[in-house]
Image (cartoon, rainbow, N blue to C red):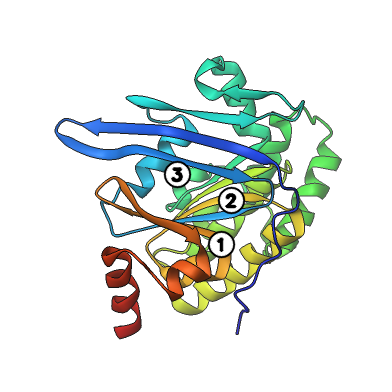
Amino acid sequence: MIEPLLPEPLLPETLLTVEGLTKRYGHRLACDSIGFTLDHGEVLAVVGESGSGKSTLLSLIAGEVAADAGSVSYRMRDGATRDLATLSEAERRALMRTDWGFVRQDATQGLRMAVSAGGNVGERLMGVGDRHYGRIRATALDWLARVEIAADRVDDPPTRLSGGMRQRLQIARNLVTAPRLVLMDEPTSGLDVSVQARLLDMIRGLVAELGLAVIIVTHDLAVARLLSHRVLVMRSGRVIETGLTDQVLDDPQAAYTQLLVSSVLAA
């Protein structure tokens, strides 16, 4: 049984600030003035039903979708806080290669499927300037071991890996450059229950070990309870309730959150 407790955030310093983030698709409001902060080492779960706006919010934060209003600010490694909208395209790409990670629900979107497992990890290292083949391969092998992929699979492409192994490879690819912020979009969706449990245990261990700040989108309240310090509940593009994970899930105040929790308990 995995204990649901996580260490508190390592530093009481705000890393990410989201203010008034809004996105419309025609007449549909996908995100309505969403705002929150995220500290160093803190894990925030964004929960809600399909179509609630969770994944759109993640795409807005990552800059993959342009917001209609609002801002996303990030404390850079030099201590300066930057509005991400003011970054050049080169600066944004560099940020995503180094200080941020993005673990996709569909691992085929987060991996180079024609490149070997080791090459997928190595590409990220090359993106931060490492050109020493021996060191890159050794680091790739080390990270494959950390995510429980056997060394003899290092030259296998992701097409020859199982779904769970692909997700673990995607995690290694994202974490090898020691990012401070990782976005995760339904990382356990579509996996068998036993594979999910193994993946969640691994994610939880790495988050605690590396002191990562994480925003994880999930429809599974059990995942939110296991991994997050705080939870943000969304419905129809709006934040319905937010607070400490145990408080919100054990004593939900909003009727919609109560319905979500009761439907899980009744399942």
Q: Nearer the viewer, mark 3 or mark 1?
A: 1
Proximity of marks 1 and 2: CB atoms separated by less than 8 Å: yes
* Left or right, 209 with reference to 119: right
61 in relation to 90, above or below: below
Whichever of labels 1 and 2 marks the residue nearer the N terminus, that label is 2
Residue matched to label 1: 228
User: Which residue is at the front of the view, 56 or 164?
Assistant: 56
Q: Is residue 187 visible?
A: no
What residue is pinned by disc 2? Answer: 214
Residue 139 located left or right of residue 219: right
Most extreme residue toward the left, as rendered?
Answer: 27
Q: Which residue is mark 3?
A: 109
Neighbourhood count class around disc 2 (C-alpha, 10 Å): few under 14, some 14–19, many 20 upward:
many
Q: Position of residue 172 (x, y in %)?
A: 66, 52
Disc 1 crowd, CA 10 A, few/some/many (<14, 14-19, 20+) = many
Per the rendering, the mark at residue 239 is none
Q: Nearer the viewer, residue 148 or 83?
A: 83
Depth check, mark 2 against mark 3: the one in front is 2
Viewer-closest of 121 and 207: 207
The answer to whether mark 2 and mark 3 are in CB contact below 8 A is no
C-alpha gap between disc 1 and disc 2:
8 Å
Which one is in front, 257 or 210?
257
Q: Amino acid at mark 3?
A: Gln
Q: Residue 7 placed where, x, y %? A: 71, 64
Dot 2 amino acid type: Val
Spatial separation of the CA atoms under disc 3 and disc 1? 24 Å
Q: Give me the residue at 30% from left, 84% from top.
A: 266
Q: Check disc 2 and report its element: helix, strand or loop.
A: strand
